[in-house]
Amino acid sequence: MLPTPSTSHVSYDRIYEPAEDSYLFLDTLSSASETAWLHSRFSTASSNTQNQQTTVSTTSSTSTLLRKRTPSTKPTPPPLVVELGPGSGVIIAFLTAHAHTIFGREILSLSVDVNPHACRATRTTVETALNESKATRHQEVVSDTEQTTQREHHGPPPTPDDNTDHKQPSTSIYLASLTGDLTTPLRQGEVDVLIFNPPYVPTDSVPDIDVLRNTFPAPAPSPISIQRDRDGSGCMNGSNARRKLELSFEESSHLLALSYAGGVDGMQVTMRLLNELPSILSPRGVAYILFCRGNKPDEVKDWIRGWNNHGDGHDDNGKNGDGNRPAGSGARWSAETVGSSGKTAGWEKLEIVRICREPFADGPRD
Amino acid sequence: MKLLTTNFLTCAVKTCKTSPLSFPLHFKDATLERTEIDYNPLFIRNVLPRVNWDALTTTATELGLQSLVPARNPGTRTETETETDIKDEELRKLHNLLLETGVVEGKLVCGNCGFEYPIKEGVGNFLLPAHLV
């Protein structure tokens, strides 16, 4: 099991504390099935042959993907992994420090958060995790070298491929923490892996971020109210945040509210991001987004599967789009639940949905 | 904020996104820092194909670091050239520039609308004032 990054330096009076939803991301993205999928999706091209032999037992879609890819000797660039709203930074730190295990290669990563405190906290969390990972790796290399000196002398030279030698120092790079509103600072078509643990709790409204545009400290509007779980939406993530609302001053209330208050159906912020996905993701790009039961994830998944892949976007018929796809376009959108928790309690059923283009699929399969 | 970040950034103003002038953003009053990063030639070589070379040349020149950028992207050699044609010296310079060089203070300016995004303590702030959203 991969170690969870330390967030002991984070002030939870203004930054969302890692909770069940955060840990669901760690568990899901490091699961055997998901790492196998990510390894295939982001393999360096030069390791294709090897992957073709070793992924026979994985899903049929993976096999299709590999069979149809044209063999090439050019290595694919390392994936750009972006987390929106990282808060403490525990997820992006986990992904960056353990990129070899999760993606099978080194990555470039960055994060965007509206909360400037979260931006600084995330940077510290990632840097700490990278240093610890490096120290652990160094120990492994030392002990490994002592035990297998002979093999190294007779072994083949290292393969010129950044994903085969797991003992080399980790050189995944955390590029930056940015303060911003979702993907607005990012160029289109560059993001390969997008992680979003959104504000998903159904609330009266989404807090205004205008206050953050000016220099802190600034007067914050009154905290918004959180609906109780009367409708059985199962989205009472608010228990944790609610306690802090009562204990904290207005500014931190506002910052924390931004981290969980999702407006109508808890979907106002998520919908803004979903509408940007077709333009922000690279062709090989994939998004992992968390939903609670009140977000009606099954409806959302059906809607996404109805997007076509024509130019800049998808049909705008709203939910339950008709799924029309332009003739000749083999690509379609896939939306699958790849991790879930709290199935029995009815208190907080969470799921992580993986959304991506399946450019190598054989066509519509409805 | 590492220099390579600028390869993935553009102006946050929606109407600027379609303008070629909004990329790359231009550094102003930049204070640089150097952080030592383990040199991994395979990694930096694989990064290069996704770097926009014209933009990098512009950015490096603005920071007075143009000597670190070869005229041509070594990551996009033609088929007749082999991988060994990529000079280690070039890769080390690019490692230095893209991964070890960061901007701690300064501004990033959009070439289209002129908006200045402040960078403080290495964190770029891309939140727009309400009238530009």
Image (cartoon, grey):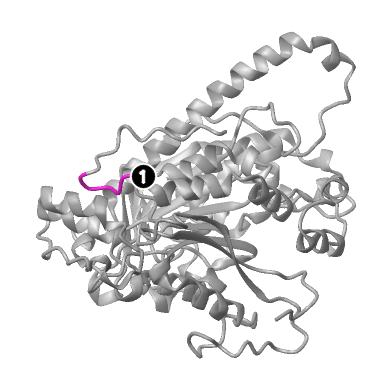
Residue at (38, 70) in percent of width and height: A294
Q: Which residue is mark 1?
A: A18
Q: Which of the chains bears the disc numbered 1?
A: A
Would you say residue A15 sits in the magenta stretch? yes
Q: Is residue A343 above or below residue B112?
A: above
- Left or right of residue A364: residue A205: left
Nearest the viewer among B1 and A249 is A249
Residue at (57, 33) in percent of width and height: A1
Mainly helix, strand or loop, the magenta region?
Answer: loop
Residue at (23, 62) in percent of width and height: A213
The magenta span reads A13-18
Would you say residue B96 sits in the magenta stretch? no
* Image location (x, y in percent) of residue A223: 14, 63
Bin the neighbour count of mark 1 within 10 Å (Cα to Cα): few under 14, some 14-19, many 20 and up: some
> Residue A127 is drawn in which quadrant?
top left
Residue at (74, 79) in percent of width and height: A365
Callout 1: SS: loop
